[in-house]
Image (spheres, grey):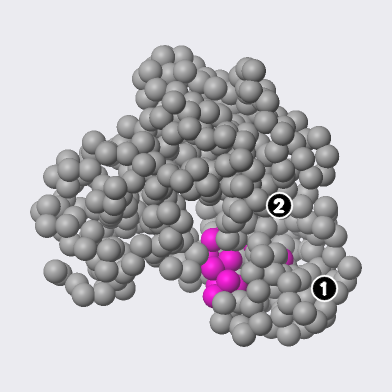
Amino acid sequence: MRFKTLDEWLDWQTALHPRQIELGLHRCKMVAERLKVLTPNFTVITVGGTNGKGSSVMMLDAFLQAGGYRTGRYMSPHLLRYNERICINGLEVSDTVLCDAFNAIEDVRKDISLTFFEFSTLAALYVFQQAGLDVVILEVGLGGRLDAVNIIDSDVALVTAIDIDHVDWLGSDRESIGFEKAGIFRANRPAVCSDPNPPQRLIDYAQQLQTPLYRLNHDYHYQKTTEQTWYWQYKAINYPLPMPALKGDFQLQNAAGVLMVLTLLQARHPLGLAQYQQGLATVRNAGRFQVIHTQGECTRILDVAHNLQAAQVLKQLLQHYPAQGKRYAVVSILKDKDIEGIMRCMLSEVDEWHIAPLHAPRATPIEELQAHLQAIGATHIHCYQTISDAYQTTLQQASALDRVIVFGSFYTVAEALTIEQNRESFQGK
């Protein structure tokens, strides 16, 4: 074994490949063939999209586990621990399992260079292949067509909401991005799109491939009936359901797409109303409007929103749960995002801004973050060297009636979540 600890493996992988992102399937597919993971011994659901991917993956996993199926779940990026990326039956795999997988990859890789994400994707497939699973859910990392996850032919593909993000890689308009997302479709295998207004290029690509495409408000439907209930409908099926534990009406859009996917797999993996009700009640997803309440302290809300569509959803949620006191924001956003658009969207929900640079690739310098805020007319801007400093200082200033919202990036939320987990009074909801 090249390395003994997970941290050593991850440090080495980070240094190994000259580029953090390199889209393309050839190298990864060659190693996957040598690993013998290209023909899965389980049902595969691949999930792509701009927003709602993570929540949809978590709902799929919750429903399938409620039905008694053995599941594998692959997601990225992680918030606190690398192990979060690869879960079996909802539980993170151990460092030992990951090190064994990396060792197996290294044994067959030879001179083929792999990115950090390609290593993790291959490790997930290797772990899942050994685990005797019924269903595996794979979340696309970036785009779809050229993402490492796409070396596997899924049994059903799900594309969630599509919006502008990662423009350097995927294009600057919804049509271009939609085409990249549709790259996870396969000929004569069903696909679901839970975006109510899918790009025409996505629809055209499905027709070109002869992929049966099931679209929200076209093939299947949902309707909110009360603050606690909604129903889902496809042909003669009509399920009355409780609201998901994940907050926000937009989660109904995600849940509706997930139910369509599972309906298409019904012959292979039967599920019923009881499993859907249980899954909706139990599903959780860290860093997605994650509300933390502690007696006598301010309310903290952590959300990984990092593009304009996600910021708009976050704004709606904040308006639905208004603060009684002062509204603080702890924010940092990566350089390749629509920083000004996101901040402008959130301007009406923030009284005081606490900003810091991220210690991450593509981090935005503090001077640029400050300039963007000043350009949109924001006041009460406070600058720090780290998000950790910004968050801890804000918590010290905020009173019990105040609200602190952390957003802008997975990295931003990860730093705040680390502090919360280290606090004795931590109670996550």
Q: Which residues are magenta?
A: 405-418
- In this view, the residue in front, 137 or 114, is 137
Circle 1 sits on which residue?
A: 402
Q: Earlier in the sequence, mark 2 or mark 1?
A: 2
Amino acid carrying mark 1 in the image: Asp
Would you identify the image quadrant in which residue 383 lies?
bottom right
| Disc 2 element | loop
> Magenta segment: does it hold 29?
no
Q: How many marks?
A: 2
Q: Residue at x 54, y 44 (%)?
A: 63
Secondary structure, magenta segment, majority class: helix
x, y percent for residue 175: 54, 27
Q: Relative to 192, is 323 on the left or the right? A: right
Q: Residue at x 64, y 18 (%)?
A: 236
- Which label sits on residue 360? none
> Magenta segment: does it hold 406?
yes
Residue 133 in view, yes or no: yes
Question: Residue 39, relative to residue 309: is it above or below?
Answer: above
x, y percent for residue 342: 68, 53
x, y percent for residue 269: 44, 34
- Which label sits on residue 247? 2
Q: Residue at x 43, y 60 (%)?
A: 91
Q: Quadrant of the C terminus?
A: bottom right
- Neighbour class for label 2 at 10 Å: few (<14), some, many (≥20)? some
Amino acid carrying mark 2 in the image: Lys
Q: Relative to 398, is 1 on the left or the right? A: left
Question: Residue 300, relative to residue 44: is it above or below?
Answer: below
Q: Residue at x 58, y 66 (%)?
A: 413
